Image (tube, grey):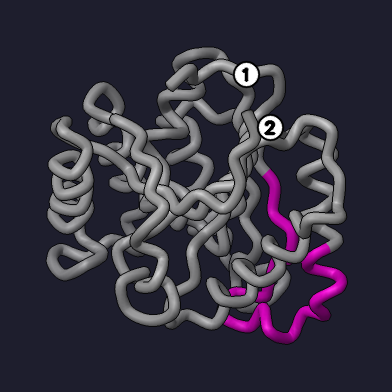
Amino acid sequence: MNIKGEGGVLVVSPHCDDAEFGCGGTIAKYTKNKVPVTVIIVAVGREADDGLSRINEFKASMGVLGVTSTGILFPGYDARLNEVPSWKLVGAIERAISEYNTEKLFIPLPSFHQDHKVVWDASLAAVRPNKVYPHLTDVLGYEYPLTVWGDGAQYQSGGLYYRIDDTMRLKMKALQQYKSQMSKDGMLSLRSVRALAARRGAEAFTKYAEFFHVLRKII
């Protein structure tokens, strides 16, 4: 796949660390090829002045991946994005797509987590067929380890694989910045992350890969 394009890459992440779980290796591939990448966090913290430690971890992680453009949409709404009016959330994502001259949009597949469901629905509304963005050609849904439990389990077909053999180390290092979030074992552990990337790699005849559900691809 030609990693370079005319526009930029926008990754919509419900919380700090979701983008790295789902497409950290892919993000690093783009930044290594000088493609502009923006990662926006939809919610962080339970109150407007909370979440500073996670924001600092997020900044450190983005530094590892080479991302210099970031944003936070709704501080203080972690685990309660359902309280944000849908028109506000959709509008914020629409503005981000336009503002960052987005060519490739990565959105989180839904899971059992209410915030992931809300962001998935809002992202779909933001890229509805009658909404025109001049540069947008790709809309891809990314998984993360817990996508397999809940609504995201149905999106295991229509797959696009990005080989990340050369950026797996950066993905792992980026996730290591989240000392407050990573588990020693279980599905949110580094061991699980490596196992999922190896499984996707086996499916794509390579060592490590990240899997995306294709929602739109314009050639």
**How many residues crowd around disc 1 within 10 Å: few (fewer than 14), some, or many (20 or more)?**
some
Q: Position of residue 34 (x, y in %)?
A: 55, 14
Mark 2 → mark 1, Cα distance in angstroms: 8 Å
Q: Position of residue 100 (x, y in %)?
A: 77, 34
Q: Three-letter amino acid code at disc 2?
A: Glu
Range of the magenta residues? 71-90
Question: Do we see residue 17 in this rendering?
Answer: no
Q: Position of residue 115 (x, y in %)?
A: 57, 76
Q: Judge left or right: residue 105 versus residue 1.
A: right
Disc 2 on helix, strand or loop?
A: strand
The image quarter in which residue 5 lies: top right
Using the image, determine if residue 113 lies above or below residue 122. below
Q: Amino acid at mark 1?
A: Gly
Residue occupied by mark 1 = 5
Q: Which residue is painted at 13% across and 54% down in the image?
A: 191
Residue occupied by mark 2: 103
Q: Nearer the viewer, residue 176 or 99?
A: 99
Query: Is residue 178 depicted above or below 198 in this figure?
Result: below
| The C terminus - image quarter | top right
